Amino acid sequence: MNSEKILLIIIIVAIVIFVAFLGITIICAVLNRGAQTLKKGEKPFWRDRRHIGIGLPWTFDVYSCDDTRLYIESGLLNSKKNEVRLYRILDLSLSRPFWLKILGLGVIKVNSSDKTVRDFELRNICHAEAVMDAISVAVEEERTKKRVGSREIINDSADDMDDDMTDES
């Protein structure tokens, strides 16, 4: 009988801790929406951290964007900073799996013509759709300012072509 009471107390304490942690996580996710969107012309006009699975910005990956570049900083002790010029960005796409959608997060996939950082992701960021739209507008403005046009690269290799055009009568 005594061991049953101890087991029941342990289960109740575990449930209380879980509910408290979940409540704190939800409150922090709602109140502390790490994404910072500023007016155009201010540097940077967007800055956010990668959020962990429960929606909190407790990582060392920082994304930011100004009028000319998109920056990706990562690491605490061994830090690394990459930048991509906006006119080199070819395509942006948004992915919001169910569990990220619940937390109000999303993943923006970026395809660029940059030699060092070709394809990368801005993972688990707040207000992903608005951020993607803001970056897209900034990319188009930078292309117009630099007079750069994007070219679609089409792979016309012989392996991809369909040679079934002969008539077999």
Image: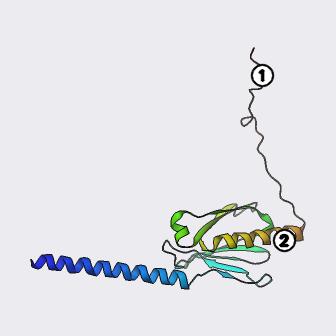
Tell me the quarter of the picture where residue 63 sits: bottom right
Left or right of 47? Residue 114 is: right
Residue, far left: 1
User: Could you tell me which residue is drawn at 40 percent across and 81 percent down?
Assistant: 21
For residue 150, the mark is none
Tell me the quarter of the picture where residue 136 sits: bottom right
Residue, far top: 169
Residues at marks 1 and 2, CA–CA distance in whole angstroms: 48 Å
Where disc 1 sits, the SS reads loop
User: Could you tell me which residue is drawn at 86 percent across and 60 percent down?
Assistant: 149
Q: Is residue 71 above or below residue 32?
A: above
Q: Which x, y percent locates residue 50? A: 58, 74
Q: Type of residue at label 2?
A: Glu
Q: Type of residue at label 1?
A: Thr
Q: Which x, y percent locates residue 53? A: 49, 71
User: Could you tell me which residue is drawn at 59 percent across and 64 percent down?
Assistant: 96
Q: How is the image coloured?
A: rainbow
User: Could you tell me which residue is drawn at 67 percent across and 80 percent down?
Assistant: 47
Of residues 83 and 30, the one drawn nearer to the viewer in this rendering: 30
Q: Which mark sits nearer the N-terminus, 1 or 2? A: 2
Q: Quadrant of the C terminus?
A: top right
Q: Is residue 123 visible?
A: no
Return the residue at label 2: 141
Q: Is residue 135 visible?
A: yes
Q: Is residue 109 above or below residue 28?
A: above
Q: Which x, y percent locates residue 151? A: 83, 55
Tell me the quarter of the picture where residue 51 sits: bottom right
Return the residue at label 1: 166
Q: Residues within 10 Å of mark 2 (few under 14, many from 20)?
A: some
Where disc 2 sits, the SS reads helix
Q: Is residue 123 above or below residue 169?
A: below
